[in-house]
Amino acid sequence: MKKIKVLISEEKINNRLDELANQIMDEYKGKDIVFLCILKGSIFFTVELTKRIKNNIQFEFVEVSSYENNESTGKVKLNKDITQSIEGKEVIIIEDIVDTGRTLAFLKELLLEKKPASLKICSLLDKPSRRIANVKADYVGFAIEDKFVVGYGLDDEQNLRNLNYIGYIEE
Ligand code: IMP
Ligand code: MG
């Protein structure tokens, strides 16, 4: 069995989520916000963050997959699109982790065509050393080193999403 070590504890995550929620509430005073959750990795982060935000909130969900496993181009594909118009709305994309940045670069371009009033990115984790695409999150929970992490929504081949902390697999 794989041994998992704690990288970021549930308590640390909770404290950081309080800060992020306050920052977002400050910057979006009196505004409705559409939180656009990228399935499946961002579900925990979306729920826990938005529970702390008092604005009027709507949710949208997209699902993307990338082909990075079988080819080097790192092409991203949209499996599930949003179901309501985001035209004229304040949209925040919620991502679990920005790695190469290809997923967010792809989504940003796609969503900007739908003419939101604003489009920001909030990511629980950021691995800046791995960046290929020119994309930057507006809100970041934690910047981490180049380690493969699991838990709190993040998976290892679809498993381990339901850990209440962020861990890494000890080799
Ligand atoms: P990007 O397109 O390279 O930025 O990758 C984004 C996606 O890759 C994330 O949404 C995750 O699903 C996945 N990913 C990247 N790094 C990790 C990791 O360390 N653990 C689990 N999933 C990861
Ligand atoms: Mg993901």
Image (cartoon, rainbow, N blue to C red):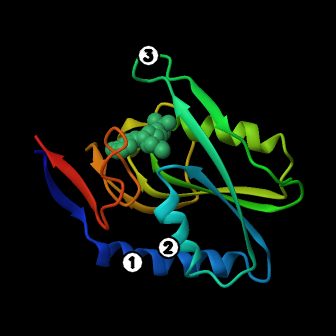
Q: Which mark is residue 64?
A: none
Label 3 vs 1, first from the N-terminus = 1
Q: Quadrant of residue 111?
A: top right
Quick check: 168 above or below 156?
A: below
Location of residue 70 with respect to 140 vertically, above or below: above
The residue identified by callout 3 is 72
Amino acid carrying label 2: it is Glu
Classify residue 68 by image quadrant.
top left
Residue 66 x, y percent position in the rendering: 51, 29
Q: Give the image location of residue 69, x and y in percent.
A: 39, 22
Q: Quadrant of the N terminus?
A: top left
**Nearer mark to the viewer, of 3 and 2:** 2
Question: x, y percentage for residue 22?
Answer: 56, 82
Ligand 1 contact, mark 3 (Cβ < 8 Å):
no
Q: Is residue 129 left or right of residue 121?
A: left
Residue receiving disc 2: 48
The residue to which callout 1 is attached is 14
Label 2 CA crowd tier, 10 Å (few <14, some 14–19, many 20+): some
The reply to whether dot 1 and dot 2 touch (C-beta < 8 Å) is yes
| Residue 134 appearing in the image | no
Amino acid type of the residue tagged 3 in the rendering: Ser
Q: In the image, which is nearer the foreground, mark 1 or mark 2? A: 2
